[in-house]
Image (tube, rainbow, N blue to C red):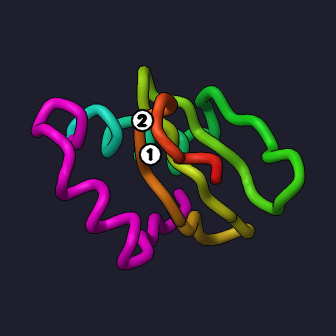
Amino acid sequence: MKTIILTAQAAKELDALPLFAREQISHGLDLYAMTGRGDIKALQGQSGFRLRIGRYRVLFDEDRLTILAVQIGKRETTTYR
């Protein structure tokens, strides 16, 4: 299992979401950290990956032991900018 680390910005964005969305995102990150399963794609034009969880996206970098969540937000907003 990989360790999940949230940047200060990602933690702030996660705290601002409704409870159901926070639980959904936490579950999605945990599932990916434990099994490697999830809707993952490499980002184009920048380094890192995105994890799609319903309407939300988690932008992250990873190595063998950790997942560093950089940004969390809705797809409709400025998540990719």
Above or below — where is 71 with respect to 35?
below
Is residue 1 visible in the rendered structure shown here?
Answer: yes
Secondary structure under badge 1?
A: helix
Residue extending farthest to the bottom is: 8
Measured as percent of width and height from the top left, residue 35 is found at: 57, 39
Who is closer to the viewer here, 52 or 29? 52
Measured as percent of width and height from the top left, residue 66 is found at: 59, 70
Measured as percent of width and height from the top left, residue 48 is found at: 75, 58
Dots 1, 2 in contact, CB < 8 A: no
9 horizontally vs 68: left or right:
left
Q: Name the residue under label 2.
A: 74
Residue at point 55%, 62% (across, down): 2
Magenta residue span: 1-22
Is residue 31 visible in the rendered structure shown here?
Answer: no
Q: Which amino acid does label 1 sit on?
A: Leu
Residue at point 59%, 30% (across, down): 38
Density class for disc 2 (Cα within 10 Å; few <14, some 14-19, many ≥20) is some
Measured as percent of width and height from the top left, residue 57 is found at: 51, 39
Report how many numbered discs are placed on residues in the image.
2
Q: Mark 1 points at which residue?
A: 29
Above or below — where is 80 with respect to 54?
below
Who is closer to the viewer here, 61 or 76? 76
Q: Distance between the residues labelled 1 and 2?
A: 15 Å
Secondary structure under badge 2?
A: strand
Q: What residue type is labelled 2?
A: Lys
Tell me which corner region of the image, top left, top right, bottom left or bottom right, holds residue 46. bottom right
Which mark is on residue 65?
none
Who is closer to the viewer here, 28 or 9? 9
Above or below — where is 16 with respect to 36?
below
Q: Which of marks 1 and 2 is in front?
A: 2
Above or below — where is 27 with respect to 6?
above
Residue extending farthest to the right is: 45
